[in-house]
Amino acid sequence: MSSVTVRIDPHVHSDDSYDGHEPVDLILEHAADIGLDAVVITDHDTMGESKRAAELAPKYGLIGIPGVEVSTADGHLLAVGVDRMPPRGESYAATVAWIHDRGGVAIVPHPFQRSRHGVRRRDVPLPGSDGGEDARGDPAAGDDAVDEVDAIEVFNAWLFTGYRNRRARRFAALHGYPGVAASDAHHLNYVGRAFTELTVRGRSSVDDVTAEDVLAAIREGTTSASGKRAPVPMAARHYLIAAGRKSGYYARTGANRGTTAAVRAASEAASMTRVGLSQGVHRFGRVLSWFR
C-alpha cells in the first residue's frame, strides 16, 4: 500500500486570539514557504479565523483543517477537525466526547503546565476508565467507558526548558498515546518551529491528502514529533525572515501597522544576534580554558 508523509503544525494562534498577533493569510503564506503541508489555527475559544484559514488553505497549497483551543473546566484542550465551537467550561471527559461526536480529534496541549492552563494528570481520560470511576477517581454516572484523548502534545516549542516536554513524552508512552509536536506560535517567526510528521496510508501524493486523512493518521498514531528549541543565532535568523515577510505582506495589503511590526521584529533579531554572539564567545573561551 502506498503512503505519504505530511508535515503539520497543529497548534498556532492568529490575531483572533486575545494573545495572538498575526493574520491568517500571513500565517498560511509563511507555512507554505517553510515547507509545511498544513497548519491548524487553534485560537482561544473562537473559531472564526480558523474556519476562514481552512477555506483559504488550498489557495496556498495547504490542507485546510479547522480547530480551536477550548477552555475546559480542567484546562486547555485542542479540538482539531471540528467546524463548531465546543462548549466552554465542561469537564475534560465531556469535551473529548463532544469532539468525537462531531468527527474531530482531541489533543492535550502543554500538559500539566498549570501556569498555562494545562490539564492535570488526574483529569486526562485514561485507557480503561469506565463507569465505576472517572478520570478523577470520582464515581461516574454511566456504565460506558469514557472517551480517551487522541494524542498528547509531547513537544511544545514555547517551553523554555525540556523538563515539561520530557514529562509529556513519558506520560504519552506510558499510556500508549500518539505524540505530536507543535509550535504553539503566537508570532510568525515561531510557526513551524515544531511540527508533526504523519504517515498517511493509501495516498501517493500530498496533493491527494484530505483533512479526514490527517485526522485518521492522528487517531492511528502514525505520528512523529519534530522540533527543538532553536539556538539563539538560528532564532535571530527566523526573526529576520519573518520581519521581511511581514513587511511584504503589509505592503501588499496596505496595512499601516506593517512598518511598526517589521521594525520591532528587526530590533528583536538584532538583540538576539548580539546575545548569540556573546554566548558563542563565552563558550569558546570556556573550551579554550580546558586546554590551559
Image: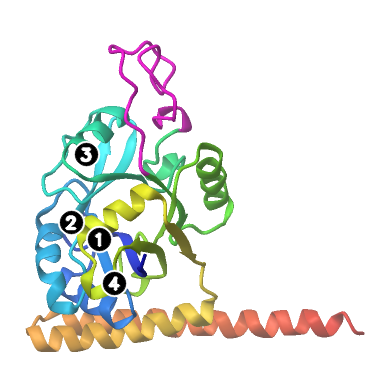
Q: Residue at x 56, y 57 (%)?
A: 161
Asked whether residue 271 is drawn in magenta, I would say: no
**Disc on the earlier residue, 3 or 2:** 2
Q: Which residue matches tag 3?
A: 99
Q: Is residue 125 left or right of residue 226?
A: left
- Are dots 2 and 4 in contact, CB under 8 Å? no
Q: Which secondary structure, mark 4?
A: loop
Q: Which secondary structure, mark 3?
A: helix
Observer-side mark, 2 or 4, equals 4
Seen in the picture, residue 21 relative to 282 is either above or below; the reply is above
Q: Nearer the viewer, residue 198 or 47?
A: 198
Q: CA distance from mark 3 to mark 2?
A: 12 Å
Residue type at mark 2 is Pro
Residue type at mark 1 is Val
Residue type at mark 4 is Asp
Q: Residue furthest right?
A: 292
Observer-side mark, 4 or 1, equals 4
Q: Which secondary structure, mark 2?
A: loop
The x and y percentages for residue 21 are: 23, 66
Residue type at mark 3 is Ile
Q: Which residue matches tag 1?
A: 40
The x and y percentages for residue 56 are: 11, 70
Q: Which residue matches tag 4?
A: 37
Q: Nearer the viewer, residue 181 or 17?
A: 181
**Disc on the earlier residue, 3 or 1:** 1
Q: Nearer the viewer, residue 192 or 264?
A: 192
